[in-house]
Image (cartoon, helix red, strand yellow):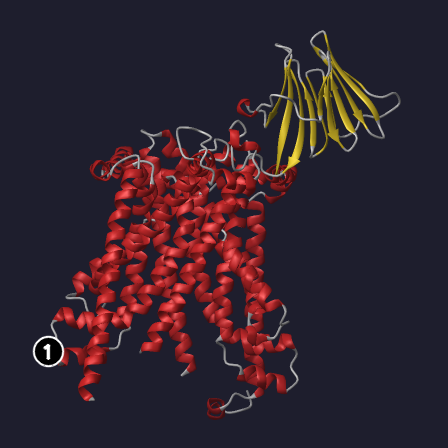
């Protein structure tokens, strides 16, 4: 009896290892085949490109050094473009966050806003989250013309869905005792939300909100490249000029990288602080 | 504040509670005001008023109409005197015998536009009959277009008639244009034209059942190849819709996302061990690996893409590497945080059996972070399929580039809609697949453990 149990365990373990091995081998094979295919479809090839990989960054860095004392002026010159990109991201995060909050409250099972709305608002969030920003941005650029607003709307649309999903998960994990307590004293729905729900969810909301702002700065910069203004549009202009504009391209790269680095570091700092404050307050 | 400090430690008195509440309300009021002030600043910065003035909402209507309909052009060239009927005015889609709504006479052509509208095209003049209005005549006299309206009627607001051009568009389904060089009448029909087979192929007039029976028929339509092959090739190489090229573009986008994410995950995992406090061999190594992650993440996907496009040219490899580089940073940071949160007991347990270092990682650590590894990788895969469309639009290729190009030429909106629908389908399908995979793998593991 004991023997057969041991054998069985060994057997299961063997089979599991075989499966794991098979998965690893198949993934490796797919990876190799995929890279081969990608390499074949690409206009430039991997090995040729490898030599050129440092050429372009080298070229723009060289041109940046050649411009010498004028380089800080370039950074200053492109500051408005950077601010525009940041504005796109900030407004999109604020508006998207507002809609996300509305969706999250409507889509949470435990907050009893109006039950028929729960599945509708969840499907809405799914669709908005899946919608690629590029499509909406291109469409709106066609209708509204070149302006930061199409990118802002496109990013806000996606944000409403993505943040909405995270917010509604936060909503579903709250402690319901506080709501019941308030309800027993006859508090209205708004009072229950204000005094029982919001204090519980706001720190988490804020943390997701900051993370999303960082993601949105990157998205806004990219959308600028397809015609939505801001730092992406400037990049497209300088890169389109080709040689000679390397110093400007370098300035733009530097601004973008530096900004993202600052936002990344500060948002992760504040989020850690929020989480510490949160868990410290609870215990 | 009547209650002593000792009492306040146990429970706040009502005064304190209300004071706190007032402070909180004040604080949220200030935050709200600040947000509103910022939004009004951006309203000015984005020049919203100017944008509202210059927006072209009619373009959206035009686009919506054009995306679900196709138009047939009746064109008369003034130079040759010839009249042609063609779908979207393309030479490859010209009717040999005009459709029934175009009546060709000896010296004139009558075009029935529906809803009672009619146009008769003469040598160098047109007569347009408008129900409840009368007949508008436009003719070329001395190189100028002269428009005569029915007596006593004001010009309709959909008509633009100047000496160089006559343009009448009573509604979205019909349009009459006349210039010194040509007369062009458009009639719109709902539906995507020649979606399956091109106009000039022998298959374009076949019904669905006829195509099916043709496939199973041994008698070859084209002696060169089997019938199923003919049907497939005609469909695949349809010049208007380019199903084959679109499919390849979708595949490129998918390839970029999958390869990029998987590469990032497998490079990030071993590096994460060096970046995690409890596994890193030394603090110096840890510092440098963490800065490497910051660097990869901080040099945004946009910058990586632009650098790789320069080095590798157009194609999926470029997009793959851009995604792989950025996400190695992202995933590396996440994995190292997960490693720092692993349970020491399991590691100690495996170590106590005399396991080697590799075995400790394999049996003590990997099982603990596997759920996070899989779920985060799948999550990034989901979001990267969207990123891959955008990177494609920057110039890496795939469906993103195709979309930008069709929108920029704005020739055939039905093609654009087709691409948009396919992209949405791809994104949503990936979303669903990765979502269900994530749920199943993680639940499966929980059930096992």
Taking the image as shown, residue B359 lies to the left or right of residue B403, namely: left
Taking the image as shown, residue B138 lies to the left or right of residue A49, namely: right
Q: Is residue B319 above or below residue B361?
A: above
Q: Is residue B382 above or below residue A48?
A: below
Disc 1 marks which residue?
B354
Residue B54 x %, y %? 62, 37
Q: Residue furthest right?
A: B152
Q: Would residue B71 be visible to someone looking at this image?
A: yes
Secondary structure of residue under mark 1: loop
* Residue B14: quadrant of the picture: bottom right
Crowdedness near tag 1: few (<14), some (14–19) or many (≥20) residues, C-alpha within 10 Å? few
**Where is the N terminus of chain B found, in terms of image quarters?**
bottom right
Q: The disc numbered 1 marks a residue on which chain?
A: B
Residue A101 x %, y %? 55, 65
**Between residues A281 and B387, which one lies in front from this camera angle?**
B387
Residue A216 x %, y %? 45, 53
Q: Residue at x 59, y 28 (%)?
A: B88
**Between residues B130 and A23, which one lies in front from this camera angle?**
A23
Q: Is residue B17 above or below residue A151?
A: below
Q: Would residue B29 be visible to someone looking at this image?
A: no
Taking the image as shown, residue B446 lies to the left or right of residue B282, namely: right
* Residue B373: quadrant of the picture: bottom left
**Between residues B172 and B307, which one lies in front from this camera angle?**
B172
Q: Residue furthest front?
A: B218
Q: Residue at x 27, y 46 (%)?
A: A35
């Amino acid at each position: 009896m004991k023997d057969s149990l041991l054998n069985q365990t060994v057997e299961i373990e063997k089979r599991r290892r075989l499966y794991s091995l098979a998965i690893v081998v198949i993934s490796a094979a797919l990876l190799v085949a995929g890279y081969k295919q990608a390499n074949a479809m690409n206009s430039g090839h991997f090995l040729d490109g490898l030599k050129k990989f440092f050429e372009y960054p080298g070229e723009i860095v060289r041109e940046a050094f050649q411009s010498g004392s004028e380089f800080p002026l370039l950074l200053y010159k492109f500051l408005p473009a950077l601010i525009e990109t940041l504005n796109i991201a900030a407004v999109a995060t604020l508006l998207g966050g507002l809609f996300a909050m509305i969706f999250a409250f409507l889509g949470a099972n435990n907050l009893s806003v109006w039950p028929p709305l729960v599945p509708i608002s969840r499907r809405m969030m799914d669709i908005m989250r899946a919608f690629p920003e590029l499509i909406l941005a291109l469409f709106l650029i066609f209708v509204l013309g070149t302006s930061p607003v199409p990118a802002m709307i496109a990013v806000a649309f996606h944000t409403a869905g993505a943040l909405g999903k995270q917010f509604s998960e936060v909503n579903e994990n709250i402690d319901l005792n506080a709501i019941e307590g308030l309800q027993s004293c006859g508090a209205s729905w708004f009072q229950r939300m204000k005094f029982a729900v919001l204090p519980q969810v706001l720190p988490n909301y804020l943390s997701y909100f900051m993370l999303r702002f960082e993601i949105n700065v990157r998205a806004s910069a990219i959308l600028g490249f397809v015609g939505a203004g801001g730092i992406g549009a400037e990049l497209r202009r300088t890169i389109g000029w080709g040689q000679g504009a390397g110093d400007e391209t370098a300035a733009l790269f530097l601004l973008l990288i530096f900004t993202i680095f600052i936002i990344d570091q500060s948002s992760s700092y504040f989020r850690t602080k929020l989480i510490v404050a949160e868990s410290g307050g609870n215990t | 504040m009547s209650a002593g400090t000792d009492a306040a430690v146990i429970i706040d008195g009502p005064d304190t509670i209300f004071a706190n509440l007032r402070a909180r309300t004040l604080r949220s009021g200030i935050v709200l005001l600040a947000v509103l002030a910022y939004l009004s600043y951006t309203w000015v910065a984005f020049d919203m008023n100017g944008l509202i003035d210059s927006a072209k909402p009619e373009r959206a209507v035009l686009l919506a109409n054009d995306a679900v309909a196709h138009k047939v052009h009746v064109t008369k060239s003034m130079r040759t005197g010839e009249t042609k009927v063609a779908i979207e005015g393309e030479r490859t889609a010209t009717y040999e015998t005009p459709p029934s709504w175009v009546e060709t006479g000896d010296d004139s052509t009558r075009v029935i536009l529906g809803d009672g509208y009619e146009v008769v095209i003469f040598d160098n003049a047109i007569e347009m009959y408008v129900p409840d209005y009368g007949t508008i005549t436009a003719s070329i006299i001395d190189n100028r277009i002269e428009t005569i309206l029915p007596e006593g009627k004001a010009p309709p607001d959909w008509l633009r008639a100047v000496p160089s051009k006559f343009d009448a568009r009573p509604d979205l389904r019909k349009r009459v244009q006349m210039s010194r060089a040509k007369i062009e009448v458009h009639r719109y029909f709902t539906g995507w034209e020649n979606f399956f087979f091109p106009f000039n192929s022998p298959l374009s007039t076949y019904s669905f059942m006829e195509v099916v029976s043709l496939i199973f028929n041994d008698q070859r339509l084209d002696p060169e190849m089997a019938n199923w092959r003919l049907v497939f090739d005609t469909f695949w190489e349809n010049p208007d819709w380019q199903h084959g090229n679109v499919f390849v573009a979708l595949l490129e986008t998918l390839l970029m996302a999958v390869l990029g994410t998987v590469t990032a995950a497998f490079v990030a995992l071993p590096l994460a061990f060096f970046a995690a406090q409890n596994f890193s061999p030394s603090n110096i190594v840890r510092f440098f690996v963490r800065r490497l992650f910051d660097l990869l993440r901080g040099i945004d996907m946009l910058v990586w893409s632009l650098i790789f496009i320069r080095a590798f040219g157009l194609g999926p490899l470029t997009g793959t590497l851009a995604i792989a580089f950025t996400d190695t940073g992202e995933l590396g940071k996440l994995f190292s945080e997960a490693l720092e949160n692993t349970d020491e007991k399991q590691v100690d347990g495996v170590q106590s059996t005399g396991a080697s270092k590799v075995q400790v990682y394999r049996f003590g650590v990997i099982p603990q972070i596997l759920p996070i590894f899989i779920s985060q990788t799948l999550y990034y895969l989901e979001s990267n399929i969207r990123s891959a469309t955008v990177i494609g639009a920057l110039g890496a290729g795939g469906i993103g580039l195709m979309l930008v190009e069709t929108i920029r030429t704005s020739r055939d909106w039905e093609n654009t809609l087709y691409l948009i629908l396919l992209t949405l389908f791809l994104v949503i399908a990936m979303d669903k697949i990765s979502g269900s995979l994530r749920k199943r793998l993680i639940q499966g593991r929980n059930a096992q453990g």
